[in-house]
Amino acid sequence: MTELAAKAARLDDTDQLAGVRERFVLDDTVYLDGNSLGALPASVPGRIEDVVRRQWGADRIGSWAEGGWWTAPERVGDRIAPLVQAASGQIVVGDSTSVNVFKAVVAAARMAAADGDGRREILVDGTTFPTDGYIAASAARMTGCTLRPVEPARLPDALGERTAVVLMNHVDYRTGRLHDLPALTAAVHAAGGYAVWDLCHSAGALPVGLDAHRVDLAVGCTYKYLNGGPGSPAFLYVRRDLQNRFDSPLPGWSSHAEPFRMGAEYTPASGAARGRVGTPDILSLLALEEALTVWDGVPVDAVRAKSLALTDFFLECVTAYVPAGLVEPLTPARHEERGSQVALRCPDAAEVMKRLIDSGVTGDVRPPDILRFGFAPLYTRFTDAERAARTLARTLRT
Amino acid sequence: MTELAAKAARLDDTDQLAGVRERFVLDDTVYLDGNSLGALPASVPGRIEDVVRRQWGADRIGSWAEGGWWTAPERVGDRIAPLVQAASGQIVVGDSTSVNVFKAVVAAARMAAADGDGRREILVDGTTFPTDGYIAASAARMTGCTLRPVEPARLPDALGERTAVVLMNHVDYRTGRLHDLPALTAAVHAAGGYAVWDLCHSAGALPVGLDAHRVDLAVGCTYKYLNGGPGSPAFLYVRRDLQNRFDSPLPGWSSHAEPFRMGAEYTPASGAARGRVGTPDILSLLALEEALTVWDGVPVDAVRAKSLALTDFFLECVTAYVPAGLVEPLTPARHEERGSQVALRCPDAAEVMKRLIDSGVTGDVRPPDILRFGFAPLYTRFTDAERAARTLARTLRT
C-alpha cells in the first residue's frame, strides 16, 4: 500500500459522514460523476413502487388530494430549503432548470421594469452552462431587454444604471470555480439590479446562504448533488418579499390562487406556489422527495468540509501520481473559489475518460479538453479519490 | 338482473377490446375517471423498477447514451404518433401541457409575424380548460399580440385578416363536446391563420387525424387516455413542413443541434427535437413509454366505436334509471359532437359524487354543477356503465 493509500484509509476512518454512504446503492466503481447524475438512494425504489402500485394503481385519482400529490411541489421545496439555507415557503419544485431560468429571468426583468428607472439590460455569466445563456437570450428578447454576456471576474465593472438582471452560476460547470455569491449579489444590489443565481453545481455540495445574502431569485437542478434521479424536476426560489411581485411568464392553472375553481380569470397564488405551472409530475417529484431523506441529520457545513478535504486530497494524489505536464488542474486551489469537483485539462480527454471508465473510474468530459471529477461528499470516500488518481496516472502512462 | 344489466353483459361478451382490460391493474371499483388519471398499465411497475434499480442504480450516467435516455423524447413521441394519426418525426414528449401550449402559441404567433401581413390577434376557445387561456394570454402579451376568447361555435365569424393563431380544445373538458377539428382547421387556414389544437381529451380516445387535416401545431397530455401516470409529460406536435420555422420561446440546451458541444451560440435542432427544452425527465418518460405498450394491436377506430357505444349505453341507462329532471345531460347526443365522456348537470354535484365514490363508482365534478364520467375504452366495460347509472339513480333517490 502506498503512503497515500494509507492516508486515504485513515481519512475514511475518521470521516464523520462515512456512514451516509450506506444510504446509497453503490458498487466497486469509483463513481465521480455525481455532479452530473447523483447515485441512487437506497430507499427510492421502494418509495416509487409504493407511489406506482398503491397510490396510482389502487387509489388512483384520490391520491391527488389524500395522497399528498397536489401539494408536493411546495412540500419538496421545503425539504430543499434548509440545504440552501432558505426559510420555508420560498421554494417550489417542478419543470426543468431551463424552464425555471426562463421564469426567474423574465420575472426579474419585469420587477426591474416595474421599478420604473429604465433598466433594460440583462447580464449573463459568459462562462455559463449553455442553457442559461440561450434561455436568457429568449427572456431578453421577450421582455424588450438587451443581453450581454460578461466574464464573472468582470461583472462588477459591467454593472450600471442600465442593469436590470444578472444571471450567474454559483459554480462553473467546466472548471469547478466557485463564484463569490455574497459579494456579487451585494454588487448587483448596489447597482440597483436583481440577482438570479443558478445553483445546479452548488445545491447539496456547499452552503449557499440564499436568505442571508438576500439573493433575489435562484434556480437549481435536483439530479446532481441532490440525487433526485435522471432529469428530476428543478427548483425555483423567490425571496419572500418579492413573491407578490413575481409575474410569471408561465401562469399555468397550477399557479392559480384557486386552481379547482377553474375560472377564466387568472389570479396568481401567493407564496412559492406562484412559481408552479402545470400539473405536477408526481413520479419524479416523489422520487426526489424520498431521495432527500438521505440528508436527515447531515449538516451542510460538514458536507462542505468533506468536499474540500476530498478535492484537496485528490489534487494531492494527482500531483504525486501523474507525471508533471500531463494534466493541468483548472479548479482553483483556494478553497473560497472551489466547488465540489476537480477539472483537469488533458489532451485526448475523451479517449482518456473512456479508458478510465473501462478501468472502473467514472467521471466525464466537457469540451474541448476537460476531464471532470465530481466529489459527492455523501458517498465518495477518500480511498475513491486515491484510486481515481492512481488509475488516471496509469491510464495516462499507457 | 335487469334488462339493461343483461344487455350490458351481452355487450361485454361481444366487445372485441374486452381483453385489453387485462393489461391494466383494476379492481371492483367502477373507474370512470380515466379522463383525469388513466389507470395503471400492469407492466409499468416492473419497467420503472428496472429503470430505477438497473439503469439509474447500476449503470448510472452511462444510461443517458446506452440506456436510450437521451433519445426518449422523440422515441416516445413516435409511439404516440399513430394514435393521433401523425407520421413519425413530428412529436416530442416533455414538459407539462401548459409549457407546451406556451411553446406552440408563441411559435405560431412568430410564424404569423414572419408571414408579414400584420396578423396580431390570437383567438382562444372561450370555454377552454383554464390553463390554455392563461397561457395564451401570456403568449399574446409576450409576442405583442392581442387575445380574444371566442365561443367555439362563433369561431368562424371571428376569423379575419388580423387572425394570427387560433388555440382550440378538441374536446370540451366540462361538457365532453367534440369540436369539428377538420372544418375549424380548414376555416383557420382559409382565413390565413395557424391552428393550434389541445388534444388533452381526445388523444387515445378517438382518431384525431393530425396529418390528414393539416393541423399546424398541437399539444396534449399523456395521463388521461394515454395512461402515462400522474403528471406524466405532455407532447408537442409540429407539422413537418413547419418545423424549420418553429422558433421556440424556450430554446433550452436539449433542443440544440449539437447539445454536447455546449457552445455559447444557439443553433436549433432540426425536426421534432427542436421542441425539447431541458434535460428530459426520465422516470416519467419511460413510465409513459411502457404505458403505451397497452396499445399494441389496438386500432384507434375500434376504440372510438367502443367509446361511442359505451357513452350511448350509459346515457340509455341514465334515462332508464334516473327519474326525469334530476340530471341534465350536457354531452351532445350526436356522435360527431361527442368525446369520450358524459357530463350531467346536477344540483349538489359535489355531494352526489362523494356518495357515488363511497358506493364504488368513481367519476369527478367540475364547477359549478357538473358530474363528469369518463369512458376509457381500453378498460371500461358495459357492465361498468350500467352499474354506474344504477348507482347514480340510487344515490339521487336517497
Image (cartoon, coloured by chain):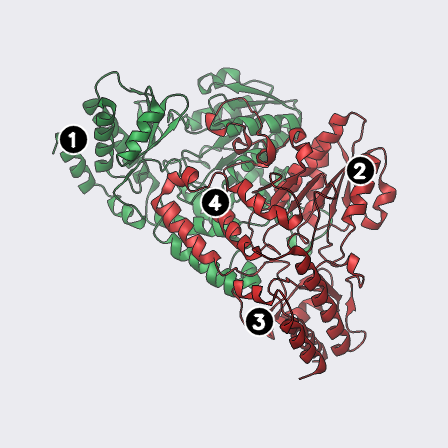
Chain colours: A red, B green
- Disc 3 to disc 2: CB gap under 8 Å: no
Check disc 3: other Cα within 10 Å, few if <14, some if 14-19, many if 20+. Answer: some
Residue nearest the observer in this picture, A224 or A183? A183
Q: CA distance from mark 1 to mark 3?
A: 64 Å
Of the two numbered discs 3 and 2 on the same chain, state the one appearing first in sequence: 3
What chain does mark 2 sit on?
A
Check disc 4: other Cα within 10 Å, few if <14, some if 14-19, many if 20+. Answer: many
Identify which amino acid the numbered label 1 is placed on.
Leu
Residue B306 vertical placement versus A18 (above, below) = above
Q: Quadrant of the N terminus of chain A?
A: bottom right
- Disc 1 to disc 3: CB gap under 8 Å: no
Q: Are marks 1 and 2 on the same chain?
A: no
Identify which amino acid the numbered label 3 is placed on.
Thr
- Helix, strand or loop status at disc 1: helix
What chain does mark 4 sit on?
A
Residue A282 vertical placement versus B175 (above, below) = below
Disc 1 target residue: B4
Residue A1 vertical placement versus A280 (above, below) = below
Disc 4 target residue: A282
Of the two numbered discs 3 and 4 on the same chain, state the one appearing first in sequence: 3
The dot on residue A29 is 3
**Which circle, 1 or 3, is nearer the viewer?**
3
Res B38 visible:
no
x and y, in percent, of residue A346 in the image = 75, 68
What chain does mark 3 sit on?
A
**Which circle, 1 or 2, is nearer the viewer?**
2
What's the residue at 57%, 71% (across, down)? A29
Check disc 2: other Cα within 10 Å, few if <14, some if 14-19, many if 20+. Answer: some
